[in-house]
Image (tube, rainbow, N blue to C red):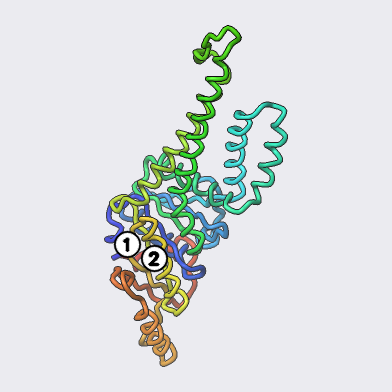
Amino acid sequence: MLLELIGHNRVVFFGGKGGVGKTTVASATATALADSGRKVLLVSTDPAHNLGHLWDRRIGDKRICVRDNLDVIELDPAATTKQHLREVGDTMRAMMPEHLHKEVAKHLKMAAESPGTHEAAILERIAKLVVEDADGYDHLVFDTAPSGHTSRLMALPELMAVWTDGLLERRARSEHLSALVRGLTPSGRDRAVAGSEDPVDRRNQKLRALLLARRERFQALRAVLTDPAECVFFIVLTAERLPVLETGEFYTDLHSSGVRVGGLVVNRRSPTDQGEFLASRHALEEQALKTLSGSVRKLPLIQLPLLPSDISGTAGITEFARLLA
């Protein structure tokens, strides 16, 4: 059923409360899609990566093939943030005179630990994957961080595009003023037409190109995330009170960001035929699921069983993937 709900959506996100099995469900889905003959890239955006543990092999910040039609990558927060700040630093140094370059370095050092820097860096990396670097893949499957982090991430593309628009507007005003000032001479002649030979003009053109490229990248990501034919989000949960309550809040956040939620994946459902204790647990889970309300209650519900053993390695994930058909 889950594969039918995904259909031809190119970008598939899995998110939810921590500890509900997002990584397992995302990996099983990617495996099932790969088994159907489609080329898939599975991406972990969670700083606390579990893909390597689940697949029982080393997975890092470079794509590796774990089986036919399936490549996997764990976005490294430290490396991503470092690369992000390096690019920001290059831009800032191009904007400022050389004697201020040490101040730029000091600012970037503080920014590395500032709130929001990690999210901005990861968002930039996601945007590049979705918009620029996904040629040859039929699906990109994202295993995301817990709900709160992912809610902010889904809202960031629009905020970052607006912020970049503000930078472009300020740059335009600054360039206009600089051109007027440079055009004034003692003779009163207007020499503003320095053309591309003027180093200030060349610098401004470079900065404008960088900002425009960044804005276009975020706008393109935003367009993908809010296109119901291109992107779908599945919320993973367990049938317990707290995950169910958090699912309702998470759905509201995603809906507000314009992201289509395609369904709920209820993981680790207790069986009804394996003794009184598990049957009682199943009854409690039914009560918890009944508290889902409003639009969330109308979403398709995929229920996956509690298994007698842990899932690990290619064989275990492949076996679990068969439950998604």
Q: Residue at x 52, y 31 (%)?
A: 171
What secondary structure is found at the residue carrying circle 1? Answer: strand
Along the viewing direction, whichever of 8 and 250 lies nearer the viewer:
250
Residue 163 placement (x, y as % from top left): 49, 43
Q: Name the amino acid type tagged 1.
A: Gly
- Look at the numbered disc 2 and give the secondary structure of its residue: helix
Give above or below for 81 relative to 92: below
Sequence-first tag of 1 and 2: 2
Residue 254 lies, in percent from the top left, at 40, 60
User: Residue 289 location, x and y as percent?
Assistant: 37, 79
The image shows residue 31, relative to residue 159, as above or below, that is below
Left or right of 53, for residue 27: left
Q: Nearer the viewer, mark 1 or mark 2?
A: 2
- Establish if 195 lies above or below 239: above
**Is 173 in front, or is 320?**
173
Which residue position is annotated with label 1?
Answer: 262
Q: Which residue is drawn at 27% across and 56% down?
A: 7
> Looking at the image, which is closer to me, 207 or 35?
207
| Residue 73 x, y percent position in the rendering | 50, 50
Q: Image quadrant for the N terminus? A: bottom left
Q: Quadrant of the C terminus?
A: bottom left
Judged left or right of residue 92, residue 25 is left
Q: Quadrant of residue 236?
A: bottom left
For the view shown, which residue lies furthest in the bottom direction?
276
Q: Residue at x 45, y 34 (%)?
A: 213
Residue 4 appearing in the image = yes
Q: Name the residue under label 2.
A: 251
Camera-side residue of 289 and 107: 107
> How many residues crowd around disc 2 within 10 Å: few (fewer than 14), some, or many (20 or more)?
many
Work out how far the residue at label 1 is from the one at label 2, CA to CA, in angstroms.
10 Å
Give the residue type at disc 2. Tyr
Viewer can see residue 202: no
